Structure formats: C-alpha cells, structure tokens
Image (spheres, rainbow, N blue to C red):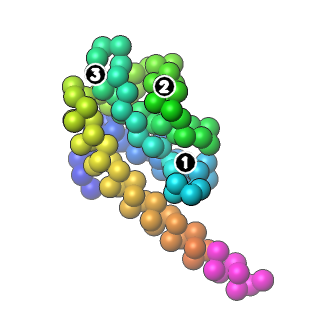
C-alpha cells in the first residue's frame, strides 16, 4: 500500500467505516463511501475532505461548510490543487480496490442466499 499521512489514513478509515457500517450509497453513479473533495480553507490551502455524509453526496459548498464545522485541521492539507489531486488519486486507488472486493463479496453472499430460497 502507498504511504499515507495520518490525516490521509483518517479519510481511508472514513471510507472503510462506511463500508463496514453499511452506510454507503450504491446507485447509478456507483458505490460511494467518501467522495474525496478538495476545498479551499481560510488559510488558502486545499483540504481533501469527504464529499459524502449522512447517506448523501454533498456539493462542494456543503463539503466545505461541513469541514469548517469539524475543523480544517482534521483533514490533509496541500499547497496546490495539483498536490491535492495527486493525493486524492493515491487514496482512490485503495478505495476502488476496497470497493471491488466489497461488491464481489456482496454478490457472493447474495448468490449464497439465493440458492437457499
């Protein structure tokens, strides 16, 4: 697995908790557990924050407001949008892999249930 900072790992934990707790969204847009969104903090830095909360995808404005309420210091910060995007892509590789494993397990479980009915 790629190297991640503690704050980046907290985003990964957020994603995995949504899988584990079955608080994800699975619709035509796909499986959503975090939807990492880059927002500009009051200090001009770009923060990668969850763009998904309480079962809904958030707008950028909603994501920023939620992050401000929680505290920007809880999220990974980057000097540029490019650095933020690179970090989000690294995390997304792990998130995608988790999602594929999760959906595969769900299909196996469903097939198992279908056979017994």
Residue 85, image quadrant: top left
Look at mark 1 in the image and give the residue it sits on.
18
Which badge, 3 or 2, comes first in the chain's sequence?
A: 3
* Residue sitting nearer the eye, 30 or 68: 30
Q: Residue 31: x percent and y percent?
A: 52, 56
Q: Position of residue 11 (x, y in %)?
A: 41, 40
Relative image position of residue 111 (x, y in whole percent) = 63, 80
- Nearer the observer: mark 3 or 2; the answer is 2
Question: If you read the primary sequence from the N terminus, does the residue marked by circle 1 or circle 2 appear first?
Answer: 1
Residues shaded magenta:
110-117
Element carrying mark 2? helix
Q: Main secondary structure of the magenta part?
A: helix
The residue labelled by disc 3 is: 45
Q: Above or below — where is 116 with respect to 51?
A: below
- Determine contact: label 3, label 2, CB under 8 Å: no
Kindly report the distance in space between the C-alpha atoms of the residues bearing marks 3 and 2: 16 Å
Asked if marks 3 and 1 touch (Cβ < 8 Å), the reply is: no
Circle nearer the viewer, 1 or 2 = 2
Q: Residue shown at 50%/64% (left/top)?
A: 102
Q: Which residue is mark 2?
A: 61
């Amino acid at each position: 697995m790629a190297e991640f900072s503690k704050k980046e790992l907290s985003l990964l934990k957020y994603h995995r908790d949504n899988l584990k707790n079955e608080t994800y969204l699975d619709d035509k847009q796909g499986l959503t557990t975090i939807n990492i969104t880059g927002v500009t903090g009051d200090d001009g830095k770009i923060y990668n924050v969850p763009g998904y909360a309480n079962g809904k995808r958030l707008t950028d404005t909603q994501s920023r407001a939620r992050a401000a309420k929680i505290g920007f210091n809880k999220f990974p910060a980057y000097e540029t949008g490019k650095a933020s995007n690179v970090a989000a892509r690294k995390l997304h590789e792990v998130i995608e892999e988790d999602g594929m494993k999760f959906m595969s397990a769900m299909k196996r479980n469903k097939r198992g249930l279908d056979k017994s009915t």
